[in-house]
Image (tube, helix red, strand yellow):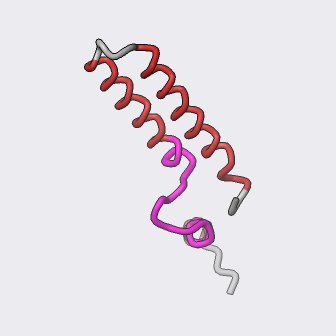
Amino acid sequence: MSGDDNFLPLVLINTLGIAGIVVWHIQGGNRPTGRLIVQILFLTGMSLVPFMASIAPHQPDGIARLQRLLTSRKRSGRNDR
């Protein structure tokens, strides 16, 4: 893995995915609307995990951390160059 700080969100996403599959199978095939709602709810939860953990899907770890560092320095008025 690229960083330990992303381990918990990864575990949460996988747990939500497995739980969604289990609930989807338990509901049975005679409830297509309920199954769709379950899929949407679990997908929404899985999408919120990286957002809440401040993981940018379009940037590698190093760049995202560098940007956070630079923006925090700009806000605090520090320039260590």
Estimate the x, y position of residue 66 in percent, counting from the top left: 61, 72
Identify the residue at horizontal 70%, vertical 81% (top origin).
80
In the image, taking residue 17 as reference, residue 38 lies left or right, namely left
Q: Nearer the viewer, residue 53 or 35?
A: 35
- The single residue placed furthest to the bottom in the displayed view is 81
- The single residue placed furthest to the left in the displayed view is 33
Q: Is residue 59 above or below residue 29?
A: below
- The single residue placed furthest to the front in the displayed view is 29
Q: Nearer the viewer, residue 56 or 33?
A: 33
Identify the residue at horizontal 59%, vertical 33% (top origin).
15
Q: Is residue 5 above or below residue 74?
A: above
Estimate the x, y position of residue 59 in percent, counting from the top left: 50, 67
Q: Is residue 77 above or below residue 25?
A: below
Q: Is residue 52 magenta?
A: yes
In the rendered picture of this protein, how many numbered marks are placed on residues? 0
Estimate the x, y position of residue 31 in percent, counting from the top left: 29, 14
Q: Is residue 75 magenta?
A: no
Estimate the x, y position of residue 77 in percent, counting from the top left: 60, 72
Q: Quadrant of the C terminus?
A: bottom right
Quarter assignment of residue 16: top right
Q: Quadrant of the N terminus?
A: bottom right
Identify the residue at horizontal 69%, vertical 53% (top origin).
5
Quarter assignment of residue 37: top left
- The single residue placed furthest to the right in the displayed view is 4
Identify the residue at horizontal 58%, vertical 39% (top origin).
14
Q: Nearer the viewer, residue 68 or 39?
A: 39
Magenta span main SS:
helix
Magenta segment range? 49-69
